Amino acid sequence: MQAVSSSALADLIARAERADPALDAALTALAPSVGGNVAPLRAAMVPLAQALTALVQANADIGLVADELRRYQKFAAPGKPSLQIVQLRKQQATVKQAALIARQNFAQATHAFLRDGGLTAPARRLPTDFATAWLGKVAAAVAAE
């Protein structure tokens, strides 16, 4: 997946909610199949960008908790784990569960986006990868203007 920053996603969401003409121009250029009617595409893009933002945040949280757990386990005495390590393991399980839910929500948002936006993913490409790359292209096109 192509990485899209959280700030770029937040900018896309804000532009889509206020119907920014620069965003509409970028959508028309990237999706000529919609024939200039970008309103459904723009409306379908907002939940997709929100789901991707949640997924990016969940993946970042997994990294933070894993780093902290590694730091404490590195110097832990053998035997029964300390209360802090047990709490960090519980937190890690919670964060992983949240990431799984975020990944599932992103997949559902991707399918809804492709269906409602009138786009089709290439045959040998995952729809989620296509949607992530597509959002990256839209963010880059809007930032260039």
Image (tube, rainbow, N blue to C red):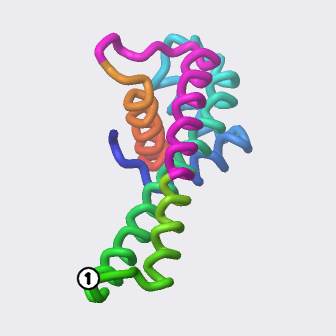
Place of residue 103 in the rendered image (x, y in percent of width and height, measured from the top left): 50, 40
43 versus 111 height, above or below: below
Q: Is residue 20 visible?
A: yes
Q: Which residue is rendered at x = 57% and y = 43% of the image?
A: 101
Determine whether, in the image, residue 135 is placed left or right of residue 117: left
User: Given the image, on which type of amino acid does mark 1 rest?
Assistant: Lys
Instruction: Kindly report the secondary structure that dominates the magenta region of the rendered protein.
Output: helix
Q: Nearer the viewer, residue 3 or 30?
A: 3
Query: What residue do we see at 51% from left, 15% from top?
Result: 119
Residue 9 appears in the figure:
no
Q: Start and end of the magenta stretch?
A: 97-124
Residue 95 covered by magenta stretch: no
- Number of numbered tags placed on the structure image: 1
Residue occupying the point 58% across, 52% down: 11
Snapshot quadrant of residue 49? top right
- Residue under label 1, please give it: 74
The kind of secondary structure element at disc 1 is: helix
Percent position of residue 124, x then y? 29, 15
Residue depicted at 40% across the width and 80% down the height: 81
Location of residue 54 with respect to 47 vertically, above or below:
below
Q: Nearer the viewer, residue 5 or 55?
A: 55
Label 1: how many residues lie within 10 Å, few (<14), some (14-19) or many (20+)? few
Quadrant where the N terminus sits is: top left
Q: Which of these two is toward me, 75 or 37? A: 75
Place residue 30 in its image quadrant.
top left
